[in-house]
Image (cartoon, coloured by chain):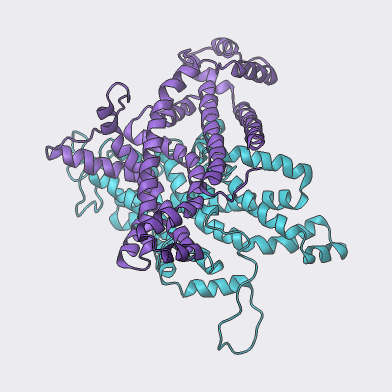
Amino acid sequence: MIRFLARRLALGVVVMFLVTIAVYVMFFAGNAENIAHRMAGRQATPDVVRRVYDNLGLNRPILAQYGHFVWRLLHGDLGRDYYHQVPVTTILKQAAPITFSLAIGAAVIWLVLGVSAGVFSSVRPRTLADRAFTTTALFFYSIPVFVLGLTLLYVFFYQLTVHGLAIFPASGYVGLTSNPYEWMRHLILPWLTLALISAAAYTRLSRTSMLEVLGEDYIRTARAKGLSERRVIVRHGLRSALAPVVTQFGVDVATALGGAILTESVFGLPGLGYESVHAINDQDLPVIVGIVIVAAAAVILANIAVDLMYAVLDPRVRLH
Amino acid sequence: MTQGIGDAISSHVSEGAFETLPANAPGTKAIEGRSPVSLAFDRLRRDRGAMISLGLIVAIIVLAIAAPGVAALTGHGPNHQYRGLDALSPSGQPHAPSTTFWFGTDDQGRDILVRTAYGARISLMVGIGATLITITAGTVVGLLTGYFGGIVDTVLARIIDMVLSIPYLLFAIALVAILGHINMWLVMVVIAGAGWASVARIIRGQVISMREREYVEAARSLGASDWRIIFVDILPNVIAPAIVFATLLLPVSVVTEAALSYLGVGVPPPTADWGQMISSAQGLYQEAWWYLFFPGIALLITTLAFNIFGDGVRDAFDPRSDRLFAK
């Protein structure tokens, strides 16, 4: 167990460093001088551009810049953004809780919705309810995040507000600690947007997996023992049917971070996704690197957590 | 390390499911050798949902090809900005659907019907082009790392891990930033650049299981070169999963193209594009629902049709797997 964790973490660190190298190489293989031109403004003389370029430290050899970056990274410093000299860690500290709130809330909703719809369908296969759920799943599986987000805004913000029911705000974010109620009110539509799209895959997964498990001998045994149907399904069936769901969840941490970029743009939430679009439009390398590092770390940790979850869910699984 | 958009797909493609398929149904006359691919197409033809969605896809393709016809029929060019009471009010308000502009006008006074038709061109061209590049690149990398193993595999497998540990969309927009100036062809490259890794991983797994098979050994003992074994002996055996992956990847590519445009890093204006139309409709949806509705519904129908069709294709190639959506 400890050895497994140590090995996975070490491998994760290797991948993280590859990620930082890749971002650096890609940035410089592109055109690093663009950034100096942009910052110097349209009227700038070549001399001014040169000075901006030098000031940013872009004139030093790439290896030296990268080495410096790694040295600071080991000290928990990600540098400052190019435009306002704000430490990247400050930007990340402001943006990360927003994306985190969005992702966690959405994940809870999609797991509950997806798995319960899937279990419900699996207990009544080929009935009208089963078909209704799978058709709904197909619809939400296909709808693009931003189309769904804007549709929800139109219906639940605009139409309700016009009709005197101003329940949902159009955009913005309120911190959980400053006002939990407002925090939730501002996040419900973004949560639904992200959750409905992901829930569809879980409905299908848990339906298939449950159908398979419910055909096993030990389920018959449990029924023969006289256990209540609810206990058979929840305690005996669901527990082992959850393994593929957990795998998919590890996969979806990254997908959700990608979906968060679009959701945050639709609802004007200044999270990591929103910051990344800005940073990329401004070619603000330190911020891009910072966000990519946080995202990659989240994905790698989620995958380790998923492997640990297998062992919890299924005692037969050994980690090594 | 698992993750990525393609991964949602790869979990639909069960491993080792593509090798042998059950013999023909009873009642067939002479025994004839049929390839798994032709058997699969037979099954696909009998799948009602898949055939209806194929019909929809054909309709969208016709719409895309006939876009200039739509423009000629209405007499409105895709980028022409109309003024006047039936197009754009003096205060810059777009006009609702009418007999002149069936889908209404946008904030520039352009015809949304004509622009939606032209948008289908970009959507399909980029969607199909990006998918072809993704599949080709992923298959070649997968074949090479799976077959050669050793240091090639170690290096490429780590690179695959790395690409997969960055969220797909974030990686795609980062690639756009690096390229600087973007056009339709570069959008295809960007989507493929973010997507090849998940294809490579699936193909790699298949190739590793085939590398030690007798037929490969036979080819080698006949003196076949590595390249011949890879592309003549092994490649045909990974074609089926590659086809399935491609059909499931298509709607993902279409949505990614629209998402990049929506975020303002896709095909540059004034080219008519669904994602871009939706993005500019965002500020106006309260007064002009039609501006959001028509490109949105066009995008939804396209992805829905591709998803149902892709599901049918997977089912045809791999009847043992369960369908994403019940029949």
Q: Residue at x 30, y 41 (%)?
A: A150
Query: According to the rendering, which colour does chain A have?
Result: purple
Residue A220 visible at all: yes
Is A66 on the left-hand or right-hand side of A260?
right
Quarter of the view holding residue A266: top left
Where B247 sits versus A177, above or below?
A: below
Image quadrant occupied by the N terminus of chain A: top right
Image quadrant occupied by the C terminus of chain A: top right
Is B55 on the left-hand or right-hand side of A18?
left
Q: Position of residue A304 (x, y in %)?
A: 57, 38
Q: Residue at x 28, y 35 (%)?
A: B283
Residue B175 visible at all: no
* Residue situated furthest front in the rendering: A225
Q: Nearer the viewer, residue B54 or A132?
A: A132
Is A183 on the left-hand or right-hand side of B153?
left
Q: How many marks?
A: 0
Which chain appears cyan? B
Q: Nearer the viewer, residue A17 or A210?
A: A210
Q: Residue at x 40, y 38 (%)?
A: A262
Q: Position of residue B193 (x, y in %)?
A: 58, 42
Where B305 sits versus A56, above or below?
A: below
Q: Position of residue B84 (x, y in %)?
A: 19, 41
Q: Position of residue B153 (x, y in %)?
A: 73, 45
Q: Residue at x 36, y 68 (%)?
A: A126
Quarter of the view holding residue B175: top right
Q: Nearer the viewer, residue A177 or A295?
A: A177
